[in-house]
Image: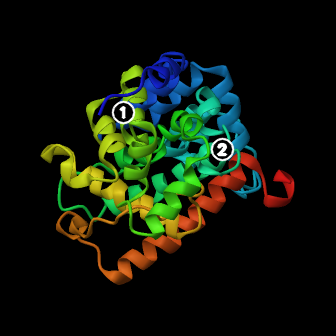
Amino acid sequence: MAIPPDIKDSIAKIKPLSQSAVRLMSVMADPDHTVGQIAAIVESDPILTGNVLRVVNSPAFGLRAKISTVSRAVSYTGGNMVVGLALHLCASGIFNHPLEGYESQRGALWRHCLLTAIASREIARFSSGKTDPEVAYTGGLLHDVGKAIMSGSLGNSAREIVAAADAEKTTDFVAGELAAVGTDHTEVGQAIAKHWSLPDPLLEVIRYHHAPSKAHEKYRPLVYAVHLGDFIAMMGGTGTGADTLLYNLDHDYKKFINVSAGELEKVILDSGQEYQQVVESMFGSEEEQQ
C-alpha cells in the first residue's frame, strides 16, 4: 500500500507530541520504572501537573483529604492515567476530533482508545510471552490514531463499506477503507507514529492490531493483547462509529493469551468499571458532561 499524497500532507502537519508525553512513554516502557521518575516528569510540566492534581482530587477518586503534591497524586492515579492525560492534553485535536467519516461524534475515538487501553493492559497479564501490561496500555491508547486522518478521506464511504460487509462483498472495514481510499487506518496510524518518533512496539501495535499474525514475532504477544482489548472495547459498546465490530477476531489469540472464559469475563467487567472511573475523573459525571 502507498499512502495517498493528500493524507501524507495531513500527517506532516500534525503537531509533535509534547516532551512530557514522549518521556513518559519511554519511562513506562521500562518495567523497572518508579513513581519518582513519573512524578519528576509531571513536575517539569505545569499544565500536566495541574491536570494530574485535578484528576486525583475529583469526586471519582473519593479521597477524604485533598492531595497537593505530585508524588502522592501519581501514587494514587498510577502511571497509566498520567500517560493518558499527557496524550489527551498534547493531542486533543487528534483524539477529540469528530470522526465524520466513521459517523461518530467528538470524543468517541478517545473513549474507545481509553477502554481498549485498560482492557489491553489486563489481557496482557495473561500473555504467554513477555508482554509488559504498561506498554499494552499505551498501545491501546494509540492503536486507532490513524482514524483521525482517515475520517476526512472516507467522506460518505462508511455506509457503503457497511453495506458491502453485510453483503459479504468485503472481508472487513479495513478492506473497505483500502478499496475506498487506497490505504487504511492502520497504515496511516503507523505513519503518524513514525512522525511522532514512537518506539517499535507501538508501531507494530498500531499497524497490525487488526492482523496480529502479521506482526513481528517479537511483538506478536503484545499485538494480540491489544487486538483482543480492541474487541472488548467494541463489545462493551464503546466503538468509533459505523465500523464498530466490522472487524475479524483472530482466534489464534488463544496461542498467545492464556485466559479462560471466566477470567475473560472478569477482565471485561473490571475494565468497564475502571473505564467509568477514569472518564468521571477526567471529564466529570454524565450529568456534568451534558
Q: Which residue is mark 2?
A: 100
Question: In percent of the image, x 61 and y 46: which residue is there?
Answer: 156
Tell me if mark 1 has few (under 14), some (14-19) or many (20+) residues whose alpha carbon lies within 10 angstroms of its own.
many
Q: Nearer the viewer, residue 205 or 54?
A: 205
Q: Earlier in the sequence, mark 1 or mark 2?
A: 2
- The x, y position of residue 65, in whole percent, is 75, 50
92 sits left or right of 148 in the view: right
Tell me if mark 2 has few (under 14), some (14-19) or many (20+) residues whose alpha carbon lies within 10 angstroms of its own.
many
> Can you see residue 256?
yes
Question: In percent of the image, x 36 and y 24: which residue is there?
Answer: 194
- The x, y position of residue 81, in whole percent, is 55, 44
> Can you see residue 99?
no
| Mark 1 vs mark 2, CA separation in Å | 21 Å
173 sits left or right of 149 in the view: left
Task: Tell which residue pokes out farthest to the left in this image.
Answer: 217
Res. 199 image quadrant: top left
Position of the N terminus by quadrant: top left
Indicate the amino acid at tag 2.
Glu
Q: Nearer the viewer, residue 11 or 269?
A: 11
Q: Nearer the viewer, residue 259 or 15?
A: 15
Task: Tell which residue pokes out farthest to the bottom in this image.
Answer: 262
Q: Which residue is mark 1?
A: 190
Instruction: For mark 1, give the secondary structure.
Output: helix
Position of the C terminus by quadrant: bottom right
Question: In percent of the image, x 55 and y 41: which residue is there?
Answer: 154
44 sits left or right of 128 in the view: right
241 sits left or right of 232 in the view: right
Q: Relative to 26, is 171 above or below?
A: below
Picture disc at residue 266: none
Indicate the amino acid at tag 1.
Gln
- The x, y position of residue 159, in whole percent, is 58, 56
Asked if labels 2 and 1 touch by Cβ distance under 8 angstroms, the answer is: no
